[in-house]
């Protein structure tokens, strides 16, 4: 069965890497529910089903669903034929927390992360294959050229690490980019000590003009520009940690234009 460009499919064919990914979840058995996104032909599924966990798979390609039903008949009732971006995530395991794992379709991988962030209370851990460029951005530290919006938003709630890199030759068809597997583990305390909606807005606003100092980016958003005289606002967004952004949000919130 051929991969479909419309679904961003590149089937992992290296069994060693597949086994490594499937065995990379660290929060089992505390959280036994696992959702595999985009299982395709089941290269990860074969290793996941042998573990002591409650596995469900979500697949948007009906041809892949039929393939999985044929080759993994005991898991037939665990296959969800839906687009992950459209599913009501809280209903997947009836409100119970669950891991996310997968060789993610690269065309929606960032959107998968955003959805996970929006439901971080339900997702204690994620292990996934990404385009290396995206993986690098997710786990990039402040000060890095790759540090950006997705870095800050993910790192507000999760601690990330690179597990290993994967070359194009390990897929069929080979992608035109390198890939990487990362693990994100939810922080013990995921409470941001600030207005979370404003936090997200300021992160996105400042990185939209990442070469500008914050005082220039935010001056049109505040009622009193004198608040921007603090040294924090003389920095560019890529220089700021999550804690720095929290500090800034609390400083400017009373002065934000409605």
Image (cartoon, rainbow, N blue to C red):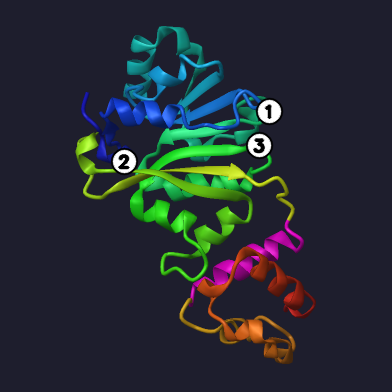
Mark 1 or 2: in front is 1
What is the spatial separation of the Cα atoms under label 3 and label 2, in whole angstroms? 26 Å
Q: Are marks 1 and 3 in contact (CB under 8 Å)?
A: yes
Q: Quadrant of the N terminus?
A: top left
Residue placed under numbered mark 1 in the picture: 96
Specify few, some or many for label 1: CA neighbours under 10 Å numbering under 14, 14-19, or 20 or more: some
Residue 137 position, x and y percent, is: 44, 58
Labels 1 and 2 touching (C-beta < 8 A): no
Q: Is residue 136 above or below residue 229?
A: above
From what the image shows, is residue 146 above or below residue 44?
below
Question: Which residue is depicted at the point 31% across and 27% down?
Answer: 16
**Part of the protein shown in magenta:** 192-209
Point out which mark residue 108 bears: none
Give me the C-alpha separation between circle 1 and circle 2: 29 Å
Tell me the distance, in whole angstroms, between the alpha carbons under discs 1 and 3: 7 Å
The quadrant of the image that shows the C terminus is bottom right
* Towards the viewer: 204 or 257: 204
- Residue at 66% across / 26% down in the picture? 30
Magenta highlight: main SS? helix
Picture quadrant of residue 245? bottom right
Please give left or right for residue 119 compared with residue 172 in the image. Answer: right
Q: Where is residue 238 shown, x and y percent of the image?
A: 51, 72
Residue 227, magenta (yes or no): no
CB atoms of marks 3 and 2 within 8 Å: no
Left or right position of 17 against 140? left
Q: Nearer the viewer, mark 3 or mark 2?
A: 3
Residue at position x 54%, y 84% in the image: 213
Judge whether residue 205 is colored magenta. Answer: yes
Q: Disc 3 marks which residue?
A: 122
- Residue placed under numbered mark 2 in the picture: 8
SS label for mark 1 = loop
């Amino acid at each position: 069965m051929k991969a479909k460009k419309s679904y961003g499919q590149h089937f992992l064919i290296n069994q060693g890497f597949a086994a490594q990914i499937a065995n990379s979840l660290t929060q089992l058995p505390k959280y036994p529910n696992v959702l595999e996104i985009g299982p395709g032909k089941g290269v990860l599924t074969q290793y996941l089903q042998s573990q002591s966990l409650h596995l469900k798979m979500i697949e948007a390609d009906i041809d892949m669903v039929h393939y999985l039903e044929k080759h993994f008949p005991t898991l037939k009732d665990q296959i969800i034929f839906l687009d992950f971006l459209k599913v009501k995530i809280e209903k997947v395991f009836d409100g119970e927390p669950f891991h996310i794992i997968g060789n993610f379709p690269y065309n929606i991988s960032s959107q998968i992360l955003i959805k996970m962030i929006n439901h971080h209370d339900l997702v204690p851990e994620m292990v996934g294959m990404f385009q290396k460029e995206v993986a690098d951005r997710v786990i990039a530290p402040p000060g890095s050229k790759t540090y950006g919006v997705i870095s800050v938003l993910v790192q507000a709630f999760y601690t990330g690490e690179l597990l290993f890199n994967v070359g194009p030759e390990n897929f069929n068809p080979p992608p035109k980019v390198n890939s990487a597997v990362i693990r994100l583990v939810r922080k013990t305390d995921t409470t941001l000590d600030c207005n979370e909606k404003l936090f997200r807005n300021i992160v996105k606003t400042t990185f939209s003009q990442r070469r500008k100092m914050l005082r220039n980016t935010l001056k049109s958003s505040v009622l009193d520009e004198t608040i921007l005289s603090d040294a924090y606002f003389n920095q560019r967004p890529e220089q700021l940690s999550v804690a720095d952004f929290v500090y800034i949000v609390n400083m400017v919130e009373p002065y934000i234009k409605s």
